[in-house]
Image (spheres, grey):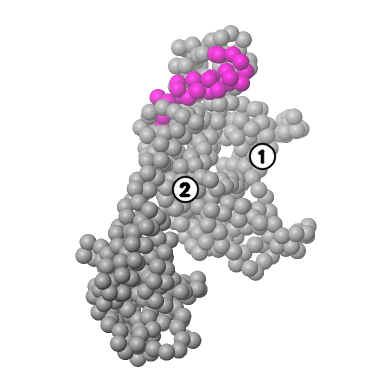
Amino acid sequence: MNTVCQLELKVLYEISQIIGQALELDQTIGEILRILSETMEMKRATVTLLDEETSLLTIRASHGLSSEEKKRGVYKLDEGVTGRIFQTGKPFVVPDIAKEPLFLDRTQSRRLERGRIAFLGVPILLKGQTVGVLTVDRIFGDDVSFEEDVRFLSIVTALISQFVQLGKLVRAREENLRRENLSLRFKLSKSYHRFFIVGQSQPMTRVHQMIEKVAPTRATVLLLGESGTGKTLTARMIHELSDRAKYPFIKVNCAAIPENLLESELFGYEKGAFTGAAAPKPGRFEEADKGTIFLDEIGELPGGIQSKLLRFLQEREFERLGGIKTRKVDVRIIAATNRDLAEAVTLGEFREDLFYRLNVFPVLVPSLRERREDIPALLNHFLDKLSREYGRRLSFSPRALDALVKYDWPGNVREMENLVERLSIMVEDERIDLGDIPPYFFTAGKPVAHAPQDGQGSLKDMEKREVVGALERHNWVQSRAARELGLTLRQMGYRIKKFGLERMVNERKGREPGLEMN
């Protein structure tokens, strides 16, 4: 057996010893190239594979190249010697790279070389299709046979192609496992967040399906629905079921922060940006890097900040307040509103281009009126939760349960939770009866109808009735009504102005001076 054959067998034997590392594709191929270089006197070697996302040929593994030289090794499918080998599926030999116009030296790794350098390239074939290219540099004398090297390199690429195939199978399996894990996490999440998604009503089943579909994607989500329906929880579930779950979930209520502070809160500021800015401070977007930022009450966002948010959605970059350095972060945006943003666009109160950017994947979170069959299970959930907290187990009488199912719940899940907690404190018996329910739930013995039973009427009308009802129940004390609805005093003030209730509020204040301070 001649020396060349012995060397080839030695190389193949050493390659066979690293098959156990094949799951780490780049590392395994790099080790193969090292063996070729050290054993066969191949000065420089690369494996270039097709990147399916960019449709470009990129160097996945190399030997004899620096990291910078490796990064420069990117080719179009019809570019240079590498592109020609990939397209034709046939080997290509360059006896002297200095005399070959097709040779691009894209990596710029041979500029200081002396002597004649030969370049050999062999396609990596998988099931008859070219998936990559193996190339090597050699310094040859005149008596060297290129045919022998091409033959041997073709054997090596046959082994590499099997590693590539194994890598694809592993990635496909990982993707299936990821999907199965997502489904399992969704089911587990259902048990942890039952107070929102308990029940089997059709509207909630539709929400479950949409959450499961959108969670693993990068899509921006817009959550729609009345106050108290569980939009914050929906956003958190989407985050927890995504690949970003181990990174931050940052919540920002756009209506709760004064307008003059909101920009610096979201995007941060530099030292000296305004009086009191003694040191630079990152904003919420930077805090949420690699995670999710939840912009609640997005409909209340001021016009100037709408423009800055639009730029971030388009380019994923921004500058801190008072700064000139452009910053980039990887953040998923989930927004929520109980306003009709399409109407706000028509009225000129919300940017149309921003609305379309946010409205990529809208999810309507239903009100309790739209999922009445879930109400008994939700009530029992809150009783279970509070029984652990207060150490006593209550239940509803059939009459009380029937009345609560018929009630329209203008404050939705938030109102229900507050009611059950109040009853758990106030009721002395083990059973909650009809007489224990606060009077405002009834008019002439019937549940109050806060919205048309046929489902007609705009969201704005229902919201107005909700605000007026809360104010009436609390003698027009805005702070108390706001607490019932889960709003800040600023948000309540905005709604009073929005629905033209200032005169009614002022008249009430005029009759009872100082009432708001109570």
Q: Residue at 28% across / 71% down in the picture?
A: 5
**Quadrant that contains the N terminus:** bottom left
Marks 1 and 2 sit apart, C-alpha to C-alpha, by 36 Å
Q: Residue at 42% across / 47% down in the picture?
A: 216
Query: Which residue lies under the disc numbered 1?
Result: 489
Residue 382 painted magenta: yes
Q: Which residues are magenta?
A: 369-394
The rendered magenta stretch, by its main secondary structure, is classed as: helix
Q: Is residue 456 visible?
A: no
Residue located farthest toward the top when viewing the structure as drawn: 429
Q: Identify the amino acid type marked 1.
A: Leu
Quadrant for residue 402, please give it: top left
Q: Where's residue 254, x and y in %?
A: 60, 48
Note whether 259 is above or below 241 in the view shown: below
Residue located farthest toward the bottom when viewing the structure as drawn: 99
Asked which secondary structure carries label 1, the reply is: helix
Query: Which residue lies under the disc numbered 2?
Result: 243
Q: Identify the amino acid type marked 2.
A: Asp
Q: Where's residue 314, x and y in %?
A: 49, 62
Quadrant for residue 278, please give it: bottom right
